[in-house]
Image: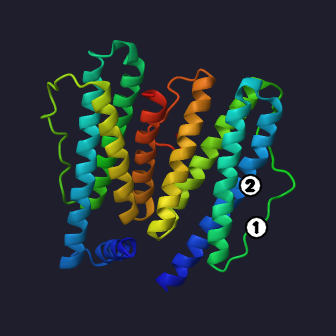
Amino acid sequence: MITSHTRRTESSALLTAIESENAAIFAYGVVAAFSNPARVNEVATHTAAHRARRDALVALSTDAGETPPTAAAAYEIPFPVTDAVTAAQLAAQIESDTAVTYRAFVEQVDTDQLRTFGIDGLTDAAIRGAGWRSALGTAPSTSAFPGDPAS
Amino acid sequence: MTGTAAALGAAAFSLSACTDNGTAEAAAEVDQLTAQAERARSDAAAATAAIALAPDKSASLTTISAERTAHALELDAEIARAAGGGATTTAPPSTSVANAPTGVDTLRTSLNDSARSAADLARTMSGYRAGLLGSISASCSTQVAVLLP
């Protein structure tokens, strides 16, 4: 009983994380279109990082016998992005959403491998998010509890 | 495996509350959480002390101190929950007074160790506690990467 419940929770954590990474990759496309040209490398690196995690999650999900969801054609952007500042705000939002996803992931999965994956994902998102908030001049750029939906 | 065992232990504890195994398991978890809270207080004190040697990093060090203090308080709350209504909350140790000024390099090393230690413990726990420790680990890594580059 515990096993089947655990499997179900774990599988839904994987699928949710894949969806979250697909949304992040799409939204970084919008960031790329409007962001400061000086940040083109940063945006490309971050997009690649989200893609690598998405691919790893898809592989984990396939290995577990699941059918991973494919990316939607478009995802909703939470506010209008019209310039470099709103682009950076969107990037900060993407990372904050990603952190929430991975903290929940860490709480739901039940193997060392997946918890490690979740903690690494949470850490990377927290660092990238703080980098964007720092660029936006938000002080402090960090938060005590990355991935806490309340913070 | 360890995670499953810990989860089962915790579940057994909350259901029967008094089996020897459950009690031992819960006591071990309380000790581990207490060690994390002490690390957090020690980092907070070291960050404050480091301002004397690196006044140019005052804003970052103040933020680190505040965040590590928040970690300690949240861990205290979790320890109180884990110990159940019966146990008294351990008062914050008043021993961390008069820290010798720590350099930023020492603090950076300590925060890296704290990030690793919290992540290692998170891997052995489940549910809210695993998420909290994972978040604390991510926070310490971010302090080093973004606030003390």
> Dot 1: what SS?
loop
- Residue A50 image offset from top left, x and y in percent: 67, 50
Q: Give the residue type that dot 1 points to.
A: Pro
* For residue B72, above or below residue A110: above
**Dot 1 crowding, Cα within 10 Å, few <14, some 14–19, many 20+:** few
Confirm whether residue B69 shows in the render.
Answer: no
Q: Which residue is mark 2?
A: A22
Give me the disc on residue A111. none
| Residue A65 can be seen in this image | yes
Question: Residue A73: where, in percent of width, then height?
Answer: 87, 55
**Closer-to-camera residue (A42/B134):** A42
Amino acid tagged 2: Asn
- What whole-number distance in Å separates the C-alpha atoms at marks 2 and 1? 9 Å
Chain of the residue displaying label 2: A
- Counting from the top left corner in percent of width and height, residue A81 is at 81, 31
Quadrant in the picture for the C terminus of chain B: top left
Residue occupying the point 41% across, 47% down: B137
On-image quarter of the N terminus of chain B: bottom left
Question: Does A149 sit left or right of A17 as displayed?
Answer: left
- In the rendered image, the residue lying farthest to the top is B55
Q: Which chain does tag 1 point to? A: A
Return the residue at label 1: A69
Tag count: 2
Same chain shared by disc 2 and disc 1:
yes
Q: How is the protein colored in the picture?
A: rainbow
Kindly indicate whether the residue at mark 1 contacts the one at mark 2 (C-beta within 8 angstroms): yes
